[in-house]
């Protein structure tokens, strides 16, 4: 079984903000697969999808970003999912808006959701799809920037990024993540 996790914050005020791009990717994937996240466990919403490649768990932690590991660690234990079968989607300030970067391991890079996952999983070695949101303009606080919605002129870039992330996830169900990573990192 694979587990695909989109990071974000629950609640209407956070919908479609930069920090919730992980939730947006999970929603796009669920819509494409004709399902919705209707189950809850360990303070997260999830659904199990039966794909030709095997079972896939789609998850949105409801713990708020900084405590994401409190949901994902217990959920992976409950379903007996190995860390190599985890893919996490989240926003990245250090990538241009709409750019994707796939990685198999690494530090949190200042991202509190990833810090929480590393703490609860006990490893930095898990698959990630980072979606670029760029840096805030001079004088704007990072917290205000990531909790704001995308600018109108960035909307097409974000829609493409979500489609590309969905394509990368689907490719990773039947191919090694390293191959998918090499393909998407080279082509984007």
Image: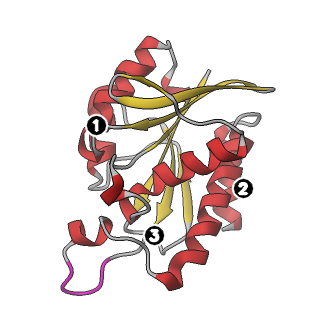
**x, y (%) of residue 159?**
61, 67
Find the magenta span and give its range: 136-140
- In the picture of the structure, the residue carrying the numbered disc 1 is 63
Callout 2: 10 Å neighbours few (<14), some, many (20+)?
few
Q: Quadrant of residue 187?
A: bottom right
Check the image and report above or below for 37 versus 89: above
The reply to whether residue 122 is in sight is no
Please give the count of numbered marks on the rendered protein: 3
Task: Say what secondary structure mark 2 lies in.
Answer: helix
Q: Which mark is residue 102?
A: none
Task: Say what secondary structure mark 3 lies in.
Answer: loop
> Relative to residue 35, is residue 116 drawn left or right?
left
Rendered-image quadrant of the N terminus: top right
Magenta segment includes 137: yes
**x, y (%) of residue 18?**
39, 65
- In the picture of the structure, the residue carrying the numbered disc 2 is 183
Callout 3: 10 Å neighbours few (<14), some, many (20+)?
some
Residue at 29% x, 85% y is 137
Magenta segment includes 78: no
Main secondary structure along the magenta-highlighted residues? loop
Q: Which mark is residue 95?
A: 3
Q: Nearer the viewer, residue 139 or 44?
A: 44
**x, y (%) of residue 143?**
22, 66
Foreground label between 2 and 3: 3
Q: Residue furthest right?
A: 52
Q: CA distance from mark 1 to mark 2?
A: 33 Å
Check the image and report above or below for 26 versus 76: below
Residue at 59% x, 36% y is 36
The disc, 1 or 3, on the residue closer to the chain's N-terminal end is 1
């Amino acid at each position: 079984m694979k587990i695909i996790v989109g990071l974000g914050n629950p609640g209407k005020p956070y919908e479609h903000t930069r920090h919730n791009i992980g939730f947006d990717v999970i929603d796009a994937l669920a819509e494409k697969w004709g399902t919705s996240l209707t189950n809850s466990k360990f303070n997260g919403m999830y659904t199990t999808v039966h794909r030709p490649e095997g079972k896939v768990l789609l998850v949105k932690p409801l713990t708020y970003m900084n405590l994401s590991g409190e949901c994902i660690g217990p959920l992976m234990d409950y379903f007996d999912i190995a860390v190599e079968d985890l893919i996490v989607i989240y926003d990245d300030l250090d990538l241009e808006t709409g750019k994707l970067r796939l990685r198999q391991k690494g530090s949190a890079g200042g991202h509190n959701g990833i810090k929480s996952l590393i703490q609860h999983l006990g490893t930095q070695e898990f698959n990630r799809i980072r979606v670029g949101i760029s840096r805030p303009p001079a004088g704007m606080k990072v917290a205000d920037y990531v909790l704001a919605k995308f600018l109108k002129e960035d909307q097409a870039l974000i829609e493409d990024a979500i489609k590309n992330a969905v394509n990368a996830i689907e490719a990773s169900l039947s191919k090694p993540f390293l191959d998918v990573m090499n393909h998407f990192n080279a082509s984007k």
